[in-house]
Image (spheres, rainbow, N blue to C red):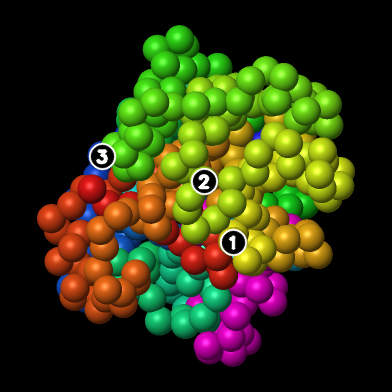
Amino acid sequence: MLEQLSCLQEIKEEKTEEPKAAGQPCGEGNPSKGSPASEEPLHLGDTAHLSIDGMGIVLFSPEVMRYVVPGSDFLTEEFTDPKQVGEHIRKGDITAFYTGTGGDFILWLRSGYPDSNVEKEFPAMIRLVVEVRGGSLQFGDLFWLSDWNPDFPQDQVLSLPDGYYHITACTRRPESGYWGDDQIICLYFNRLEEMPELMWQGVPYLFTEEQETEPQDASAQGQDRREHGEMIRQLYRVKELQGYTEEKLAVVKKYFNSLPRVLEEFWNRAARTEAIHKVQDRWIRPEDFDRWDWLKDGDYLVILIENQGCCRAGIRRKDLTKADPPVYVAADQIKDQRWTLCAGTLSGFLRAVLAYEAVFAFSIHGEELMYWLTEEELETVRSGLEKQPFGLSGWLAGNGYEFLQ
C-alpha cells in the first residue's frame, strides 16, 4: 500500500516532465488491431483484448529475455517467490502485476503519463519499468511463463522503440462488481533516458487495500447470501439450507478472533448443508479446528482441502478483518508453505467452488467424469455459453478453472 501511495506521488510529479501524447483520453484512439488473424503488431493508441487463466499479466521484450531456454518453467524457477519477482521488477528485464483474478481484460495502450481525469476515473494505479530491445514488447498470461515460448501472437505484441520505459498501469472495478469481467486496464508507456530506480520488494498488485476492504451495503450483502444459497438449492437439489450455530463458530474464533463477514454468513446460513459435503473435496467444519493443530496454528484459515490432501485453500490470517478477502491455495496439506492467489474475493471463491464441486454430486452424468476437448471443440462449447464472472486459479496441480452457463 505504501508503495502504491508513493507511486501516485511520483506519477503526479513526473507528469510535469512529459504530458500525455496529444492530450488523448485513455479510452479514445485507434480501434484494436488485436485479433487471432492479425499479422501486424499493436502500436500505442491501440486497444488489446486479453483473456487470462492466471492471476496476473506479464510484459517483457524477447530480446532482453533471450537467455531463457525455450520450454523451461520460468514461472517456477524464477517468478514465483515474491523476492525473485521483486528483483526482476526492479531490474526491468521482465515485469508483471497481479490482477487478483483471471478473466477478460481490455488493455488501452497509451503514451506518456495519465492525466488527472484518468487518475480519477481509474483510481487503482501502480508504476513499473521495463527495458525494450528489438523494437517490441510482449504481454500475456502469467501462466505462460511455465512453458517459455518467446513467440507471442501478434495481438499480444506492442511495437516500441528500444529504450527504458515507465509503465503506468491503472484500472477500476468493472461495473458488474467483479474483477476480471471485461476489466479495463490503461497502460501508459513513457520513454526514459536511463533505467529508473523502483522500490518494489515483491509482487505489484493492481488493486488497492481500500478497494479490497471496501464495505458492501446491505443490498450487496443480501445478494451474496442469495447467490450462495440459490446455487446450493439449484445445483445440489436441496430445499432447506443448514448452517452452523454461533457456538460452533466460537470454536474457530477462539483461534482466529474475527472472521470475514462473507465467511461467517456462509457458515451461519448454508455451510452445514449435508449435500455440499458429499462431493470430491472436503469443506473444513468448525469442529475440525479443535481436532487438528495444523489448522489452528497456521498463518491461513483453511476452508477447503482436496480429497487426497494435494492442495488446500485458505484466507491469510492478516486478511480476516476484511469483509470479502482474497483466497489463496497451497500444495501438500502441511509441508508446502508456498501460497498463491486462487481467487480475488472469498465470495467469488465460494461461487466457483460450489459450481466445481457440484459436478461430482450430479445424479446423472456421462460414463466418463472428465473429457479432454480440442481447442476447436472448446470454442464450440464457449460460443453457446456465457462465461461466469468467477473462477479458480492454482487449484489442483496449478490448474485454472473457468465456468460457463
Residue beneath disc 1? 307
Amino acid beneath label 3: Glu
* Residue 64 falls within the magenta-colored stretch: yes
Amino acid beneath label 2: His
Q: Nearer the viewer, residue 13 or 284?
A: 284
Secondary structure type for disc 1: loop
Q: Give the residue displayed 55% in from the left and 33% down from the top.
A: 272
Q: Is residue 55 above or below residue 41?
A: above
Where is residue 59 shown, x and y percent of the image?
Answer: 51, 63
Residue 272 seen in the figure:
yes
Q: Is residue 192 left or right of residue 29?
A: right
Q: Nearer the viewer, residue 270 or 394?
A: 270
Q: Is residue 275 left or right of residue 154?
A: right
Query: Which mark's residue is nearer the viewer, 1 or 2?
Result: 2
Q: Earlier in the sequence, mark 1 or mark 2?
A: 2
Query: Which mark's residue is nearer the viewer, 1 or 3?
Result: 1
Q: CA distance from mark 1 to mark 3?
A: 50 Å
Snapshot quadrant of residue 208: top right
The label on residue 28 is 3
Secondary structure type for disc 2: helix
Q: Give the residue displayed 74% in from the left and 42% down from the top.
A: 288
Range of magenta residues: 54-82
Within 10 Å of disc 2 (Cα), the crowding (few <14, some 14-19, many 20+) is some
Snapshot quadrant of residue 10: top right
Quarter occupied by the N terminus: top right
Q: Are marks 1 and 2 in contact (CB under 8 Å)?
A: no
Q: Give the residue displayed 58% in from the left and 86% down from the top.
A: 72
The label on residue 277 is 2
